[in-house]
Amino acid sequence: MSSDTKFVIVGGGLAGAKAAEALRDAGYDGQLALVGDEEHLPYERPPLSKDYLAGSAGVDDLRVHDEQWYADNSVDLRLGKAATGVDAAAKTVELVDGSRLEYDKLLLATGSSARQLPLPGASAHGVLTLRRIEDSDKIKEVLERQGSLAVIGGGWIGMEVAANARSKGCDVTVLEAADLPLSAVLGPELGRVFLDLHRDHGVEFQLGAKVAEITANDSVVTGVRLHDGTWVEASAVLVGVGATPNLDLAESAGLDLDNGVLVDEALQSSNPDIVVAGDIANQDHPVLGSRIRVEHWANALNQPAAAAATMLGKHSPYTELPYFFTDQFDLGMEYVGHAAPGSYARVVTRGPLETREFIAFWLDDSDRVLAGMNVNVWDVIDDIKALILSKTPVDVDKLADRDTPLADVRRP
């Protein structure tokens, strides 16, 4: 591609930084600008609820590249200057300072924002969310003074923060609207494993909880009141009820939207000059055979290579399976595949759940593996992927038998 071309990446997170890297690695030598609304160099977000929050990683450990890398690779960093609009006809990106960047190809990797709750008291001092470094720093302050923490939402962010807070000696109560934490992702079969884990470490739960208000005194948080009148005392409240994809720029560009930006298998949007990666991409997944939008680290890490290839005129479908991981107390877990609620027929486990050392498999009604989760069992993720990708029915008894190699569980 001509060296006088202009590529623009909007998104100062992992996906944006990896896209810049992928373009340069692929030999693109034209102009390349990366726009981010934060002042920080692009960084990874999972440590914000894990190592960074725990104090075992610093800001430098979060960065995808150091500042010198961007200079060496001629990446024009526009940090702390949010993009406010895309004029797809003129092929320009407008920034908050009024300047405009022209592009031949544009990559949108704008990520997500923490979902807010329209509750009385939601603006009180001590109400927290977690999406950025500064958010994690505020939560650290609570942990360091061993304040009491109420966590609204028993998803991954809420449960990871709860584990960190309890490990620091804080009193922690998780308020979850469902009957179990993580049930929307893991279903009832596995959600109880995490409930029991946290209870064993002293985390309190209010399940089936409907939050009425966040209480405050002189605009400072004092706790959370539920609709049934229950009051949970807390010096800080973390709202961890999911994320909302940042679609304003995609909308301004006139892209086709539906639960994110609709993209094809190679992450091409409805506009031939705009590709998409990361949280906002609702991809027509060539392996899963359905559309999927995933807000996980692995997509931000791996999708940019395919997006960069598409920008360079090469058709490179993104075929990686969804993947995520968590570390909570003494439990480490990896999950690969996709088994949405209602999409699977049963869950088969290899090893007893109570030991918290097992593998779980989500199967469809033909006994094909849709997803797998290894808990405190390692070096099996490739074998689980192979079962999913084979789309071959398995022998359920062999699948549950720890003495049968995973390579030998498929039906003949």
Image: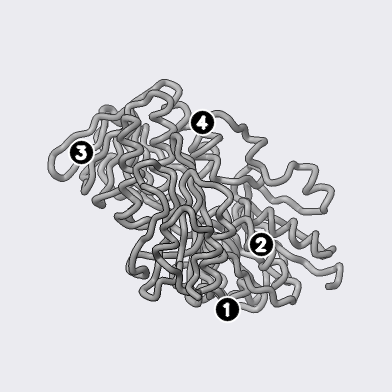
Please state which of the two labelled residues, at mark 2 or mark 3, is closer to the viewer: 2
Residue type marked 1: Ser
Residue type marked 4: Ala
Whether residues under marks 1 and 4 lie with C-beta atoms below 8 angstroms apart, the answer is no
Mark earlier in primary sequence (1, 4): 4
Disc 2 target residue: 304
Mark earlier in primary sequence (2, 3): 3
Quarter assignment of residue 164: top left
Quarter assignment of residue 175: top left
Residue type marked 2: Pro
Could you say which disc has been placed on residue 225 in the image? 3
Q: Residue at x 13, y 39 (%)?
A: 229
* Within-10-Å neighbours for mark 2: few <14, some 14–19, many 20+: many
Residue type marked 3: Arg
The alpha-carbon separation of the residues under discs 3 and 1 comes to 45 Å
The alpha-carbon separation of the residues under discs 2 and 3 comes to 43 Å
Disc 4 target residue: 54
